[in-house]
Amino acid sequence: MLGIFAYYKLPFEYTGNGRYYIGNKIPDFMSTKENKIIEYFGSYWHKNPDEGADRQIFFKSAGFNTLIIYDWEMKNMSIMINKIVQFAKSDNVKNNPLTSL
């Protein structure tokens, strides 16, 4: 994913290491400038089908738009890249109550 962000000059950075918390949640990739989050869900850890929607609602309440990418979507890279680029270029939410560690 970082290679995609760099190649398309998208303003996302990896934050899944605990660099940023929003409430008690750690987003995978963020653009704090654009108030956007990309979550990468692997099938092994994210088996609950409601988890993606729950995280989108949670982050939206904190002022962030969220895109969920599932590991199986990487099988068709062109569709996944288009999805990420379109999300990055879409209108964003203004409001950033981000807590940085």
Image (cartoon, helix red, strand yellow):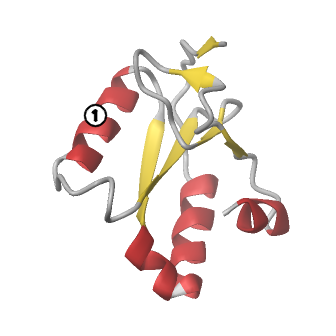
Q: Residue furthest front?
A: 44
**Is residue 2 rendered to the left or right of residue 7?**
left
The answer to whether residue 69 is above or below residue 57 is below
Which quarter of the picture shows residue 54? top left
Total number of numbered discs in the rendering: 1
- Of residue 22 and residue 94, the one placed in the foreground of this image is 22
Residue 75 at what x, y percent from top left?
48, 86
- Of residue 81 and residue 73, the one placed in the foreground of this image is 73
**Is residue 98 rendered to the left or right of residue 39?**
right
Residue 38 at what x, y percent from top left?
52, 49
The answer to whether residue 78 is above or below residue 42 is below
Residue 55 at what x, y percent from top left?
32, 37
- Of residue 83 and residue 51, the one placed in the foreground of this image is 51
Q: Pointer 1: what residue?
A: 57
Which quarter of the picture shows residue 78? bottom right
Which quarter of the picture shows residue 5? bottom right
The answer to whether residue 52 is above or below residue 5 is above
Residue 43 at what x, y percent from top left?
32, 65
Disc 1 marks a residue whose amino acid type is: Ile
- Of residue 94 and residue 76, the one placed in the foreground of this image is 76
SS type, badge 1: helix
Residue shown at 56%/53% (left/top)? 90
Residue shown at 42%/15% (left/top)? 23
The quarter of the picture where the N terminus appears is bottom right
Residue shown at 42%/26% (left/top)? 25
Q: Label 1: few (<14), some or many (≥20) within 10 Å?
A: some
The quarter of the picture where the C terminus appears is top right
